[in-house]
Amino acid sequence: MALFKNLFISSIATFFVALTLVLFILPRTDALMVWIWFAVLVGLNSYRLLGLYFFKKQLGKNTSTERWYKHFKTGAYAAAVLWGAPMWLFYPYNYPEY
């Protein structure tokens, strides 16, 4: 299935982009919230990479593509929510200009 084709590389890139965001935003907002977000993102990436592992393990067998499509779609939607969340979670509430 073509959906999983670039997942490994994009998961590595996602980790480093998220780490960059954490290091950039950490001095400007609540550190606990930032680290919780990062931990959830790492957990989601692990979930998606486990899905990739099991997909490749069952690649030659008679498996339902619908199941893998749902798994991939769930991970992609969860990642979209997590990447959209910093706009609200990391809003610097103690800066008067905001």
Image: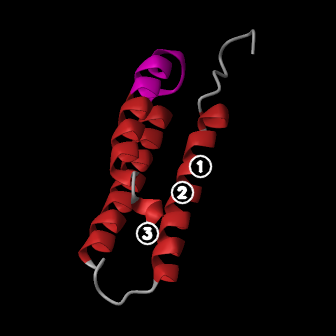
Which residue corresponds to mark 1? 80
Q: Earlier in the sequence, mark 1 or mark 3?
A: 3
Amino acid type indicated by mark 1: Ala
Residue drawn 63% across and 41% down?
Answer: 84
Q: Which mark is residue 76?
A: 2
Q: Nearer the viewer, residue 89 or 14?
A: 14
Give above or below for 83 relative to 68. above
Q: Quadrant of the N terminus?
A: bottom left
Region of the chain picked out in magenta, as a range: 20-31
Q: Answer with the quarter of the image where residue 10 lies.
A: top left
Alpha-carbon span between mark 2 and mark 1: 6 Å
Q: Amino acid at mark 3?
A: Met
Location of the C terminus by quadrant is: top right
Q: Which residue is mark 3?
A: 1
Secondary-structure class at tag 3: loop
Horizontal and vertical percent position of residue 81: 61, 50
What residue is drawn where x is 45% and y is 75%? 68
Q: Measured from the top left, where is residue 54 in percent x and y? A: 29, 72
Q: Residue furthest bottom?
A: 62
Instruction: Compare residues 41 and 2 and report the one nearer the observer.
Output: 2
* Spot occupied by residue 87 in the image (x, y as percentages of width and height): 65, 33
- What secondary structure is found at the residue carrying circle 2? helix
Q: What residue occupies the far left of the structure in this picture?
A: 57
Main SS of the magenta segment?
helix
Q: Alpha-carbon distance for marks 2 and 3?
A: 15 Å
User: How is the protein colored in the picture?
Assistant: secondary structure
Q: Are marks 2 and 1 in contact (CB under 8 Å)?
A: yes
Label 2 Cα crowd, 10 Å radius (few <14 / some 14-19 / many 20+): some
Percent of width and height locating residue 38? 42, 39
When the figure is inspected, residue 81 is found, relative to residue 3, above or below; the finding is above
